[in-house]
Amino acid sequence: MKLSAAFALLTDLRFAVQAAFLPTLSAIFRSPSLLLHPTRISRTFMSYVWKVFGNGVDESGRPVKAALIPEAYGVVLDLGAGHGHTVFYLDPAKVTKYVALEPNELMHPEIRAVAAQKGFTEAAGTLQILPYGAEQTALITSALGGRHTADTVVSILTICSIPEPERAVRGLAEDVLKPGGVLLMYEHVLSPRPDVAWWQRFWTPLWKQAFDGCRLDRPTHLWIRDAGVWEESRLWGKEGEDEENLFWHQVGRFVKKAN
């Protein structure tokens, strides 16, 4: 693997620190009690990072998402919604409710603003924002009114950062998604190349500290594929992607068994 590729992520890390360090420090000065809550500090930092990175990350995945997400229908659960970019790819004629799952409440105002641009609002009952992580399936099902309430689950660059990801994937597939429902996935995952995977594992301890738990070394696509509930299962790569990319992507479409 070329060293330029192995160290490329340091540029993103530098930009993230430049964008978020001083605003986060300012937030701590305004509210010193944040020092007692490392998770809140991490989410504060990430909220500032995403203001700078969010649109660019969305743009880099636009061809994939434009081909994948319009298939979503009915009640759509968007895991780790961020600023709600997923709504730009939804077909409002097919979607009855957009449910944005985002534990970082500092991002909720952006979700409301972005969703409103596509006609999804809380007042109309077409938008619901849940302040939970994807691993909190019991809370999700309760908020949605019971098990098997989502017609579509959308996972865009999210499973990389949640706790207990394998358990979360099973819970979402078994308890949240309706029988016959669809899971649409676009995630950066562990590379099949041993040299790239080595560098992914090398950088993960540093990267996850800066990016709210994001890990480079998770075989998310395999965990979803092997959930054991699918009638149809398809995985493919991101067209034109350099195989030495530390953020190696997989795209997937999974249909749950009808019963």
Image: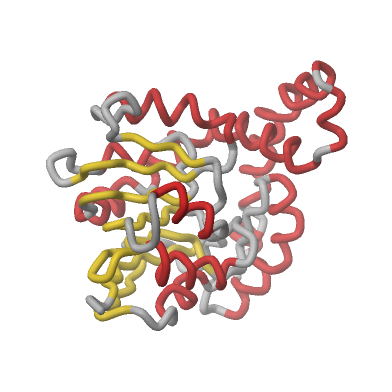
Q: Residue at x 48, y 41 (%)?
A: 130
Can the viewer see residue 199 in this picture?
A: yes
Residue 39 image point, x, y percent: 74, 43
* 26 horizontally vs 105: left or right: right
Count of marks placed on residues: 0
Seen as rendered, the residue at the extreme top is 30
x then y, percent, for residue 61: 37, 49
Q: Residue at x 26, y 78 (%)?
A: 257
Percent x, y for residue 171?
48, 68
> Could one spot residue 238 in this view of the protein?
no
Quadrant of res 42: top right
Quadrant assignment for the N terminus:
bottom right
Q: Which one is in front, 125 or 193?
A: 125
- Give 97 or 57, whichever is nearer the viewer: 97
Of residue 196 and residue 160, the one placed in the foreground of this image is 160
Q: Quadrant of the C terminus?
A: bottom left
Considering only vertical position in the picture, is 87 above or below 172?
Answer: above
Q: Is residue 81 depicted above or below 222 in this figure? A: above
Can you tell which quarter of the image residue 135 is in? Answer: bottom right
Q: Position of residue 170 (x, y in %)?
A: 48, 72
Q: Is residue 211 shown above or below 117?
A: below
Residue at image location 50% in from the left, 69% down from the top: 220
Task: Kindly indicate the quadrant of the structure image that contains residue 193.
Answer: bottom right
Q: Is residue 234 left or right of residue 11?
A: left
Q: Residue at the left extreme?
A: 93
Q: Quick check: 51 left or right of 184?
A: right
Q: Nearer the viewer, residue 253 or 172?
A: 172
